[in-house]
Amino acid sequence: MKVYLDYVFIENFIVNISILYQTSIFTKTKVSKIRLITLSIFLSIISIIKILQISNNIIIQMLAVNIVIYLLYLPTSIVKYLKQQMYYYLIYIIYIGIIISTSIFFSINLSNIYIRILLYIVTMCVTYIINKYMWKIWINKIKYNNLTYKIVINSLNNLTFKVFVDTGNNIRDSFSNLDVIVLNSKAYNLKLKSKLIDNKQREVVVIDVLTAIGKSKIKGYIFNDVSIRKGGVEKVILKKAIILFIDEKINNNEYEGIISYNTYLEKLEGVTI
């Protein structure tokens, strides 16, 4: 089978410049266009050397990629360098995977150089879109995981609720200076069994809450001995806390309650697992 080295060079150049450029975008690294083109050419030459069987050592190829990543992005620390490598290989795997799966699914004839080049360009756009939205989903997931806790009302036989820190929620009772926790009333009532019902008269406080339509007053109830946990580890115990009950779903019922951002900053931010 004839192998046209100029075709190989062009194809590899398109793939290399696409992956290197996207890596720069997702690592928020400014790159010189001249360096980007030059180093993409260098990697394309390495691919030709592999075809000519001058060197088929996978270690040499990976070393060439790592040298290119360093020279192109000029990382200021090892952490940044490793991050750039991780992104490069992640984007590379997704890029090649899309090419293979697309060509198989649509039965694309890859013997035509122009069809292959068109496929590489389309794949570059698809990869960019996929990585862009994957990144957003990933960041949001990390954010919620980091800010997800469980509150346990010890005075009610360890009644437990899954909650998250709402960074836009700074509710605090200015009079008592107690921490305020918001719970979904349906989740609370559902977990309350007859033996857990607290018959004691609770102290009621009225809290000013800022909503989308303005300020409103909501009744809060003081609970004793409320602990906040993460990963099964108790982070802090609130001797007294005010709990507000609302009927609205909390993040589409993914969570049962909300912790105030003030509570997070003052009681949880400096506490490690």
Image (cartoon, rainbow, N blue to C red):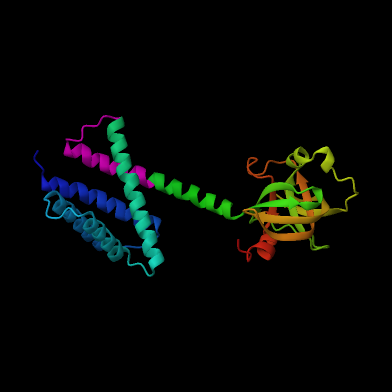
Look at the picture and state if 147 lies above or below 118.
below
Q: Would residue 124 be seen by someone viewing this image from the given angle?
A: no
Height in image: 253 above or below 169?
above
Q: Is 117 inside the magenta-drawn segment? A: yes
Residue 121: give x, y in percent of width and height: 27, 43
| Residue farthest along the right direction in this orientation | 201
Is-magenta flag for residue 202? Answer: no
| Residue at point 57%, 52% (across, down) | 145
Q: Where on the picture, by quarter, is residue 180?
A: bottom right
Q: Quadrant location of residue 259? A: bottom right
| Quadrant for the C terminus in the image | bottom right
What span is in magenta?
106-128
Predominant SS of the magenta segment? helix
Residue 259 vs residue 272: left or right?
A: right
Q: Residue at x 86, y 46 (%)?
A: 198
User: Is 98 located above or below residue 82 in the figure?
Assistant: above
Residue 92 position within the rendered picture, expressed as x and y whole percent measured from the top left: 32, 49
Name the residue: 63% across, 40% down. 252
Q: Position of residue 18 (x, y in %)?
A: 29, 51
User: x%, y% of residue 201?
Assistant: 91, 49
